[in-house]
Image (cartoon, rainbow, N blue to C red):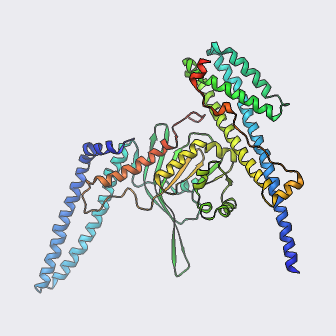
Amino acid sequence: MYIIIGSIVILVLGVILTYNNLVGARNAVENAFGTIDVMLKKRYDLIPNLVEVAKTYMKHEQSIFTQLAELRSRAVSPSLTSDEKVHLENQISGIMKNLMVSVENYPDLKASEQFTLLQRSWNETEEQISAARRAFNAAVTQYNNAVEKFPSNLFANIFGYKRKEVFVIAEVERQNVSAKALFNS
Amino acid sequence: MISPDSFRAFYESTLRSKFEPLEQFRRDRWDKLWKYGGGAAAAGIILTLAGVDSGLLISVVAIAGSVYFYRQFQQEFRDRYKREVVGAVVNAFGLDYDPHRRIERPEYERSKLFLDSINRYYGDDLVTGKVDKTAIRFSEVFTQHVSSNGKNTTVRTIFRGILFVADFNKKFVGETIVLPDRSEKAFGSLGAFFQKMNFARPQLVKMEDPEFEKHFVVYGTDQVEARYILSTALMQRILTLRNKVNTGVSLSFIDSHVYIGLPINRNLFEPSSLWESIDNFKQIEEYHYLVSLCMTIVELLDLNTRIWTKE
């Protein structure tokens, strides 16, 4: 009798723990995604400042600034789908990389203390975004494991938990920036 | 940084002559000890054999006196050796050296590298200074936990080696701790489960670099911040450091500092024996190796790159 009661208790506990683990993993993914958003927001906030300082020195790059301002205003609009967001994000990253390379042509700008500070903040947010993405991927991996591994996959099927995709770095970003190619274009 | 080759040249040209007064002192003391102590003891023995009653007393007094002077000699030699020889080697790197100071216990505890309780804290040979933009400090630290049940006393060593502290180049607010991965290596996924259940540490941070994960386990108060500190490049650099020192190195990133524990199971920065000449390049080279290793950490972990907001 006790053995049966004991087995039932263990079974129920097991069910609760497995289910909670699944929910925890899903929430961790949402939380990690939120963090990426926060970091991206931080980066968007930096853009106007950077542009403001760079503009005064970089007379020949006005088209870049216009493009950047436009992309930024689109990126901060709340009605974007996550695919659009990622696409805009990649475009902004590409342009910013080009901009940072062109800075080499403007020694006065490079020497400007204000710009150096902004550039440092930029590097910092870049690393933070990359860290947030990696954290997101780690959370997704853990979640996917929970969704697919036995016995939690049983609950995943019942409650409709599906595999999530990890962040894949866009092809443009994966290539190293080639200064030569940028100047030739 | 001084390469081993240029250090040899530096030793020949500069250090060697600096060590001469101390070598003179060492020889001189030995001579005196042999001459007076040994002479008196021998005289006492001869007198005893010749049947003089006070002979034995003279021998005993001579031997006791010699032991006393030997101890004093030893102490004085050690002090001077550390200041003049080890100090000269450390200074050659542009760093400061104090044989009597150490990284103190509160800092050891703040590093959170070793959480086991300790009741013995030893250490000496504090080296301080700057490597380019990065302030560093390190010393020998030896901690133990002694417990006794009335009959038996058990002494457990918690850490013995070099505790290294440097200013870290990124800003952060939380705590990230990187420890050698023992349990996962030994017990596989069961070990990973125990790592997760380690309540003494903050949450487990799973890194995506399999090589890094094989050798280390990471705990952190913030998943994103831990990855911000441990960039993919830094993980590779930590692996390089681990391979270089070939020992279970542990690191923690707390309060804008990086703390590194390098276990080395012997007494460091100590003089060679009193019997040997101090003009011993092999011995001096060991000090050079230890100091340059700690300086290399700055380079290996790229701490001088200040491209983030922290200057």
Residue A77 vs B81, above or below: the answer is above
Q: Residue at x 51, y 76 (%)?
A: B153
Where, by quadrant of the figure, is residue B92 drawn? Answer: top left
| Relative horizontal placement of residue A125, taking residue B182 as reference (left or right) | right
Q: Nearer the viewer, residue A57 or B146?
A: A57
Residue A73 vs A8, above or below: the answer is above
Q: Residue at x 27, y 43 (%)?
A: B14
Where, by quadrant of the figure, is residue B196 drawn? Answer: bottom right
| Percent position of residue B246, x then y | 47, 55
- Confirm whether residue B202 shows in the render: yes
Where, by quadrant of the figure, is residue A67 drawn? Answer: top right
| Percent position of residue B90, x then y | 37, 47
Task: Count numbered badges in the picture.
Answer: 0
| Relative horizontal placement of residue A164, taking residue A173 as reference (left or right) | right
Q: Dividing the image into 4 quarters, which one contains the N terminus of chain B?
A: top left
Q: Dividing the image into 4 quarters, which one contains the C terminus of chain B?
A: top right
Q: Residue at x 53, y 36 (%)?
A: B305
| Percent position of residue A5, x then y | 88, 76
Q: Nearer the viewer, residue A180 or B7?
A: A180
Residue A73 vs A153, above or below: the answer is above
Q: Residue at x 62, y 51 (%)?
A: B210
- Confirm whether residue B173 shows in the render: no
Kindly give the residue lying farthest to the left in the view shown. B50
